[in-house]
Amino acid sequence: MFSGKLMSKSLGAVEKGMWVDFVENNEKAKRIGYGRLNNKDWDDWHDTSKKSWSSVITSAFSEALMLFAVSPFDLPGRIVRSLVPPILHRFRIIHVDLLGPSLAVLILICMLVLGQAEKGNVLGAERLILLYCVLLPIVTHFALRCSQAAITFMQLLTLIGYSLYGPVFTLSVSLIIDRERSNAIFFLCLAVFGGLSTLRVVLVLLASLRVPAARLLICASVAVIQLLFVVWLHFTYLHPSFVFGKGSA
């Protein structure tokens, strides 16, 4: 009984100590953590009663350009941080930008198009990747908003976008080592790169959610979808002998 109380206190301390710093447009970091709400940006964006449409469009265009204003010397560090869980302080900083996620999408599409050309697969890789990058953040954001999560859509889009470097490294390393022939090498790379990137996403979402049931449901669903998506890409586009739909013929 004493050990159970001690365990519950330690878990409570871990939950209350979880936090992540989101840095937008090189400004001051905005911290989210367990039980904290951060809806100020959402309210400010919809408070356009005192602004003209031209000023709103101009500010939106300038903010969109700032999302791609990333120094080439900072981009490798952000890519490395996307593969490390937010345990230490230096890895709890998440920069909100779209340059890194766009580069990951481009690399992933090029790899899958190359594998599609060699296998003659009829499934469009570019449409599949774009559909995944659009639907997963939208559905996840809707579930997070229903659960009163302290994370905005752009923060979530950046988080999921940088997590694509897990599939990029998983598929590229297994392709370079054994040209995707060995399933053991692929699943080893998936456990290392895909597992680390997915764990980072799960821990950040865990720190922003308040409802325990929603934390379990949303985090488990996102983790399963991300890992199964990489497995499906491997066997559908890059595996030399597997043909999608051949077993049902």
Image (cartoon, helix red, strand yellow):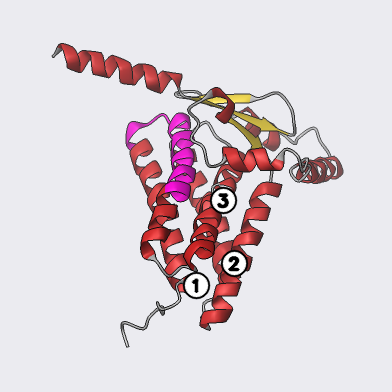
Q: Residue at x 37, y 64 (%)?
A: 183
User: Can residue 204 be seen by looking at this rendering?
Assistant: yes
Neighbour tally class for label 1: few under 14, some 14-19, many 20 plus, Cα within 10 Å: many
- Left or right, residue 12 beside residue 113: left
Q: Mark 2 falls on what kind of element?
A: helix
In three-dimensional space, the C-alpha distance between marks 2 and 3, rounded to whole angstroms, equals: 13 Å
Magenta-colored span: 192-213
Q: Decide: marks 2, 1 in contact (CB < 8 A)? A: yes
- Left or right, residue 164 beside residue 240: right
In three-dimensional space, the C-alpha distance between marks 3 and 1, rounded to whole angstroms, equals: 17 Å
Neighbour tally class for label 3: few under 14, some 14-19, many 20 plus, Cα within 10 Å: many
Q: Which mark is residue 69?
A: none
Under mark 2, the amino acid is: Met
Neighbour tally class for label 2: few under 14, some 14-19, many 20 plus, Cα within 10 Å: some
Under mark 1, the amino acid is: Tyr
Q: Quadrant of residue 90?
A: top right
Query: Residue 10 at what x, y percent from top left?
Result: 31, 16
User: Can residue 228 be seen by looking at this rendering?
Assistant: no
Return the residue nearer the eye: 150 or 121: 121
According to the image, label 2 marks what residue?
111
Q: Which mark is residue 165?
A: 3
Which of the two discs, 2 and 3, labels the residue nearer the N terminus? 2
In three-dimensional space, the C-alpha distance between marks 2 and 1, rounded to whole angstroms, equals: 9 Å
Query: Residue 209 at what x, y percent from top left?
Result: 44, 32
29 to 51, vertically: above or below: above
Which of the two discs, 2 and 1, labels the residue nearer the N terminus? 2
Q: Mark 1 falls on what kind of element?
A: helix
Q: Quadrant of residue 152?
A: top right
Which quadrant does the C terminus fall into? bottom left
According to the image, label 1 marks what residue?
237
Residue 24 drawn in magenta: no
